[in-house]
Image: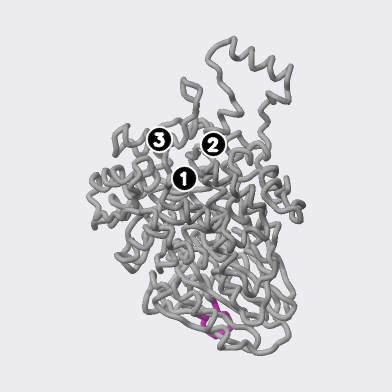
């Protein structure tokens, strides 16, 4: 796990070593174990390393035998032992035991198709001096980030966007359409960023540049399809799920340093810790965050899971003053990012980093095994179940007589976005000032493309597919990457794994999510039955809380953060007023509409930090 940077000057002028060193220094938190730079005339790369595999031998940048292929790499390749053996058999010679050197030789062997051989999380840049090109790639599921800045004169890339933001003599332009998408979704989807000149390399994409700037790509090199296998019984699916998840956890445990796990007490993290405890012959270190507010606190369940597996458990309680980290969060995320669970993720990462340099987390269980409440709401909406005949008849005639008031449920992208968006088009239209009212859109081209692909899938699989392509990489994985790497902590996600995703796509919908007798829907059934081997029913079947923050209480009138909220959003110094109608902001505060309020709270701090060097 590392931080990577690089520069390519299209006019052939030599790379400024001081600039490359400055860029590398800005991501020192991502790699406290060491740093390195390689420059060859007009191209240069830098690396800050967090040493997890081969701490002594895996220094970066790293090259092949003749010094013609150089790499800077962020991430881990979990199948590198198998690949290394295959490459040795093909005649390649290795100087280290690091997974990064395997990437170099895989590139020598298969060229840009090397990424199709990797199981892991990665973002890397390869300089090929033989062919005179720069090759960039990002892992299949978007676990590791990569930002690219292109101007007429040069190309620069980095693991975090703020590195590019601080290149001298560079003025960036605010992308207001991206800002509108932030208000819509709470994140900015790839390839867009908050700056018009900067893009994100999308998950499962590769791109290459010749030394004069000619571009090949970006090209998608992997995707997946839902192809349910209806021949297996529930018992067989439980057994198969157990085998796949156990294998993934085992693969993610490859390390030359100590490690632990996040343990919230939820189904996913408890299952990951269960596998770790069975696979390892040492006591697992676990880490949890709680709140004083009981409705948000799952500490007791995390402690139950810890007791079950006798882990070395560490706990920290988060209080309202926790938002004091907002300036640091904003600086590291680098663009508006509205998932408030970044706060507890920051604190649990800080807690873990004081004990171990690497942890496993349970992220990905909801997307792969249909666990989100939004999936249950979607299924309930699309399949309304009424207990009595007269209720079904009444609903049918209401839809026939007054279709505008009682529309038939249609499994469209608009229907899904209504369930999950933060501010719909009308709300955003009301919020923007008059001169910006052209911005709110009803279309998200990338979402429409992916939803169209999913149209052949079952109802729940459609939105699971969309989440794996959008919400998972752009929100969940972005959140955990930045919040953990702020503390130099590597976080691995064994349920977000190419083999797990491809396996989960073969599970028929009804094994994951089913409607109950009361007409409601319950998801993540397979994982709950797996966990039921180790925990009682009341532990498994309780209502899902997620990693939510008590903002509704903290932001409410009389709450611990109400005064600060009003000052930031409505005070005379608020930069939000350059874009938004203060009366609409006040309305959100009066209604204590927590989701949009946090988006604006975060955005206000971002605007403060980016006034210089950004045009809007």
Q: Is residue 571 above or below residue 127?
A: above
Q: Point out the tag, 3 or 1, that comes first from the N-terminus.
A: 3
Report the number of discs.
Answer: 3
**Percent position (x, y) of residue 400?**
73, 18
Q: CA distance from mark 3 to mark 1?
A: 28 Å
Q: Which mark is residue 557?
A: 1
**Percent position (x, y) of residue 177?**
71, 57
Residue 555 in sight from this viewpoint: yes
Q: Point out the tag, 1 or 2, that comes first from the N-terminus.
A: 2
**Percent position (x, y) of residue 67?**
55, 85
Residue at position x 42%, y 65% from top?
Answer: 81
Nearer the camera: disc 3 or disc 1: 1
Q: Which residues are magenta?
A: 61-71
- In the drawing, does residue 257 fall left or right of residue 551? left
**Percent position (x, y) of residue 235?**
40, 32
Q: Which residue is mark 3?
A: 543
Helix, strand or loop at mark 3 = loop
Q: How is the image coloured?
A: one colour
């Amino acid at each position: 796990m590392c931080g990577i940077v690089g520069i390519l000057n299209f006019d052939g002028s030599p790379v400024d070593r001081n600039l490359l060193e400055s860029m590398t220094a800005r991501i020192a938190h991502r790699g406290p174990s060491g740093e390195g730079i390689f420059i060859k005339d007009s191209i240069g790369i830098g690396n800050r390393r967090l040493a997890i595999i081969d701490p002594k031998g895996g220094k970066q940048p790293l090259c092949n035998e003749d010094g013609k292929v150089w790499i800077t790499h962020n991430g881990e390749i979990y199948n590198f032992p198998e690949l290394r053996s295959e490459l040795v058999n093909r005649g390649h010679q290795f100087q280290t035991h690091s997974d990064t050197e395997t990437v170099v030789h895989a590139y020598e062997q298969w060229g840009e198709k090397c990424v199709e051989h990797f199981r892991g999380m990665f973002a890397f840049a390869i300089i090929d001096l033989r062919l005179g090109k720069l090759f960039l790639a990002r892992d299949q599921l978007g676990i590791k980030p990569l930002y690219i800045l292109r101007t007429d004169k040069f190309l620069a890339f980095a693991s975090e966007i703020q590195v590019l933001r601080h290149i001298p003599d560079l003025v960036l332009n605010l992308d207001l359409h991206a800002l509108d998408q932030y208000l819509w979704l709470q994140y900015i989807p790839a390839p867009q960023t908050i700056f018009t000149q900067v893009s994100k390399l999308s998950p499962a994409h590769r791109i290459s540049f010749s030394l004069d700037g000619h571009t090949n790509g970006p090209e998608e090199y992997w995707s997946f399809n839902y192809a349910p296998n209806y021949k297996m019984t529930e018992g067989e699916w439980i057994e198969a799920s157990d085998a796949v998840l156990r294998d993934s956890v085992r693969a993610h445990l490859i390390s030359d340093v100590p490690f632990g796990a996040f343990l919230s007490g939820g189904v996913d993290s408890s299952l990951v810790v269960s596998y770790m405890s069975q696979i390892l012959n040492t006591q697992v270190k676990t880490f949890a965050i709680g709140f004083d507010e009981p409705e948000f606190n799952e500490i007791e369940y995390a402690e139950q899971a810890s007791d079950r597996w006798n882990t070395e458990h560490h706990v920290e309680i988060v209080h309202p003053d926790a938002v004091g980290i907002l300036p640091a969060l904003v600086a590291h995320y680098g663009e508006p990012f509205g998932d408030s669970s970044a706060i507890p993720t920051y604190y649990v990462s800080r807690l873990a980093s004081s004990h171990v340099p690497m942890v496993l987390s349970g992220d990905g269980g909801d997307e792969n095994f249909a666990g989100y409440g939004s999936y249950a709401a979607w299924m309930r909406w699309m399949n309304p179940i009424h207990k009595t005949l007269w209720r079904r008849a009444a609903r049918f005639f209401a839809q026939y007589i007054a279709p505008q008031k009682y529309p038939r449920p249609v499994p469209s992208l608009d229907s899904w976005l209504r369930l999950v968006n933060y501010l719909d088009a009308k709300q955003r239209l009301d919020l923007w000032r008059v001169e910006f009212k052209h911005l709110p859109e009803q279309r998200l081209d990338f979402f429409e493309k992916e939803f169209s692909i999913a149209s052949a899938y079952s109802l729940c699989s459609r939105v699971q597919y969309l989440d794996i392509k959008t919400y998972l990489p752009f929100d969940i994985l972005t959140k955990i990457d930045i919040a953990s790497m702020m503390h130099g902590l590597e976080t691995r996600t064994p349920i977000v794994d190419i083999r797990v995703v491809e396996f989960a796509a073969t599970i028929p919908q009804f094994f994951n999510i089913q409607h109950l007798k009361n007409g409601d829907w319950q998801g993540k059934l397979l994982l709950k039955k797996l966990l039921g081997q180790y925990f009682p029913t009341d532990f498994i079947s309780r209502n899902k809380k997620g990693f939510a923050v008590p903002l509704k209480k903290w932001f409410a009138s009389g709450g611990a953060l109400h005064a600060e909220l009003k000052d930031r959003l409505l005070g005379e110094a608020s930069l939000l007023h350059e874009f938004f109608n203060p009366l609409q902001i006040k309305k959100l505060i009066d209604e204590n509409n927590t989701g949009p309020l946090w988006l604006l709270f975060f955005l206000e701090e971002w605007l403060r930090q980016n006034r210089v060097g950004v045009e809007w």
